Image (cartoon, helix red, strand yellow):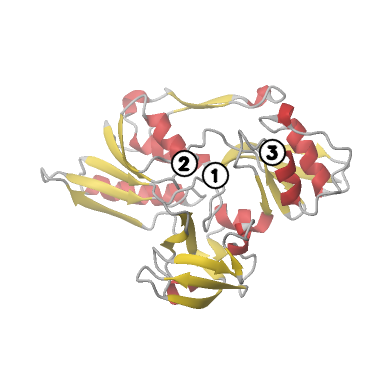
């Protein structure tokens, strides 16, 4: 039986509506002979994993009760907190469908280590239930958040699935809420507009929540508007952006960079020494008439992976002023490998 292995570059897996992924173009066919997904994961971690030489050797993987547990046993916890395994449908909905099945909220850890809502999707079950930014999640399906090891519970696989939440509002009111999953149109760029600075200069502002397949079209829409408005500067809001397809980050960088930097190195893919044939450079290729020698980027600890890539590739060439919190800190990507109903993402 042949399993198709799709090579992708993946971002940070955060407590959010979306996981994070960054697509690379080639597809690899592999003739497998493993009887279980756990053994397939074992192969991947000894072959494609960046830190393959630190992976334990097991005679069998049958002692692990789930793919998540199997991957966790093989990861280098000192160097890697990002590798993951997830339902394939969830991954495909997140990045390649115009609609995703979701409850419609993102979660983050606040400064007191409480899990709070940082974003609610318009038209979602969460919005209809009155959940807003700043709600604290106390329990999910009667398990306290400290008891939950796998937050994939907030990523439903089909419409109609329900989840029970015990929540506390920003005003201190606690309540029990049941949410029902529904199909949502992904709002990857929910807002763009113009603002003025203290000198009355017109600036473009764009909020990008993730880099998915549809993001370049939304970037074009926003930048066409900015061009019509004759903006003199740019603010990119990546507070909720845990990553996404590298192609989206590339597209945004090409929209921003002055044309004088065409063909300059943007970034380089570098694999482990078993797959150095996949190493490759990516170069700037200007896409529109707008260009900026200085931009402002708003970040939080949720800003990760492809979002950080966007920031880092511009820094050698233009002035990038970062506002807010220090970003997540993820200088690696992943490949995605399909096996049955699962997607496995070793860095």
Whether pointer 1 and pointer 2 mark residues with C-beta atoms closer than 8 Å, the reply is yes
Q: Which of marks 2 and 3 is nearer the N terminus?
A: 3
Residue found 58% across the figure and 59% down from its top: 146
Question: Is residue 186 something one can see in this rendering?
Answer: no
The quadrant in which residue 87 appears is bottom right
Tell which of 300 and 98 is nearer to you.
300
SS of the residue under disc 3: loop
Where is residue 292 shown, x and y percent of the image? 27, 34
Q: Which mark is residue 12?
A: 1
Pick the front one: 295 or 27: 295
**Residue 242 versus residue 176 in the image, above or below:** above
Look at the numbered disc 1 and give the secondary structure of its residue.
loop
User: Looking at the image, which residue is at 64% across and 56% down?
Assistant: 149
The quadrant of the rendering that contains the C terminus is: top right
Secondary structure under badge 2?
Answer: loop
Nearest the viewer among 44 and 208 is 44
Q: For residue 1, which numbered disc appears in the image? A: none
Q: Where residue 75 is drawn, which disc sits there?
A: 3
Residue 196 in sight here: yes
Which comes before the other along the chain, label 1 or label 3?
1
Viewer-proximal residue, 229 or 94? 94
In the image, which is nearer the foreground, mark 1 or mark 2? 2
Front of the two marks 1 and 3: 3
Q: Contact, CB < 8 Å: mark 1 with mark 3?
A: no
What residue would you read off at disc 2? 328
């Amino acid at each position: 039986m042949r399993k198709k292995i799709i090579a992708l570059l993946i971002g940070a897996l955060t407590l959010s509506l979306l996981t994070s992924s960054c697509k690379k173009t080639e597809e690899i066919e592999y003739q497998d002979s493993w009887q279980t997904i756990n053994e397939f994961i074992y192969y991947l971690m000894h072959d494609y994993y960046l830190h393959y030489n630190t992976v334990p050797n097991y005679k069998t993987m049958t002692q692990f009760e789930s793919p998540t547990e199997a991957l966790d046993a093989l990861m280098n916890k000192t160097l890697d907190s990002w590798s993951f395994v997830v339902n394939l449908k969830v991954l495909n909905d997140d990045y390649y469908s115009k609609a995703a099945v979701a409850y419609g909220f993102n979660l983050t850890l606040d400064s007191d280590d409480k899990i709070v809502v940082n974003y609610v999707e318009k038209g979602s079950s969460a919005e209809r239930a009155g959940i807003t930014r700043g709600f604290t999640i106390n329990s999910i399906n009667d398990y306290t958040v400290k008891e939950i090891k796998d937050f994939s519970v907030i990523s439903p696989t089909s419409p109609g699935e329900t989840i029970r939440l015990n929540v506390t509002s920003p005003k201190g009111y606690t309540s029990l809420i049941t949410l029902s999953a529904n199909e949502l149109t992904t709002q990857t760029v929910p807002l763009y507009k113009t603002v003025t600075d203290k000198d009355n200069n017109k600036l473009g502002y764009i909020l990008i929540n993730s880099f998915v397949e549809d993001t370049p079209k939304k970037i074009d829409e926003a930048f066409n508007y900015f061009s019509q408005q004759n903006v003199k500067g740019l603010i990119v809001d990546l507070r909720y952006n845990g990553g996404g397809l590298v192609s989206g980050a590339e597209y945004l960088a090409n929209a921003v960079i002055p044309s004088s930097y065409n063909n300059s190195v943007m970034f380089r893919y570098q694999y482990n020494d078993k797959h150095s044939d996949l190493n490759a450079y990516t170069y700037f290729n200007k896409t529109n008439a707008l260009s900026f020698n200085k931009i402002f980027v708003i970040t939080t600890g949720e800003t990760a992976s492809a979002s950080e890539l966007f920031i880092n590739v511009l820094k050698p060439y233009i002035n990038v002023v970062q506002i807010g919190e220090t970003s997540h800190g993820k200088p690696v990507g992943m490949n995605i490998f399909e096996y049955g109903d699962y997607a496995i993402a070793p860095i």
